[in-house]
Image: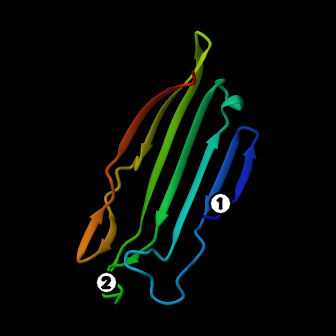
Amino acid sequence: LNRPTLRVLRCLVACCGKPYGSCPRKRPNSYPSTRLSVSTNSRQSHTPVKDLGLSIGGYYIGRRPVNNSDQNYIGGYTTISGGISYHYKLDGVPYTVRVTGDNLSNKNAWAAAGSSLLGVTAPRLIKFSLSGSF
């Protein structure tokens, strides 16, 4: 992906991308004509709450053929992901707590096609992590 990055504010970085390489002829099974992503994150040292990080992103997948004969198409969809992180030290050891979510709008869509089968998008997924540097 080509991801141009733009510093919007001192504490905010935005990036968006569209993949290179489009098929001049027929696309392979389930390959979208358009894929776009836009994301932004704040830098932890410049947020109003020190050591707090925020991120959000949107991902668009365009309509795709169900087979190489272009007999039918499955529609496009957009999902939203986001997260929050907090950095702190405990007894001199740096830790990071993260909560992230994928498909936050819980969008149901056809995500893949091939071999006479259709696959669906993953449901909303919330993840928690705690990491430390020893």
Rendered image: mark on residue 72:
2
Identify which residue, 104 or 35, lies in the foreground. Answer: 35
Q: Residues within 10 Å of mark 1 (few under 14, many from 20)?
A: some
Is 28 positioned to the left or the right of 123 in the image? right
Q: Earlier in the sequence, mark 1 or mark 2?
A: 1
Q: CA distance from mark 1 to mark 2?
A: 31 Å
Amino acid type shown at disc 1: Arg
Amino acid type shown at disc 2: Asn
Q: Residue at x 43, y 42 (%)?
A: 101
Q: Is residue 66 above or below residue 85?
A: below
Q: Residue at x 32, y 79 (%)?
A: 66
Mark 1 and mark 2 residues within 8 Å of each other at the beta carbon: no
Q: Which residue is mark 1?
A: 3
Q: Residues within 10 Å of mark 2 (few under 14, many from 20)?
A: few
In the current view of this chain or complex, which residue is farthest to the front?
134
Q: Residue 8: where, in percent of width, then height?
A: 73, 48
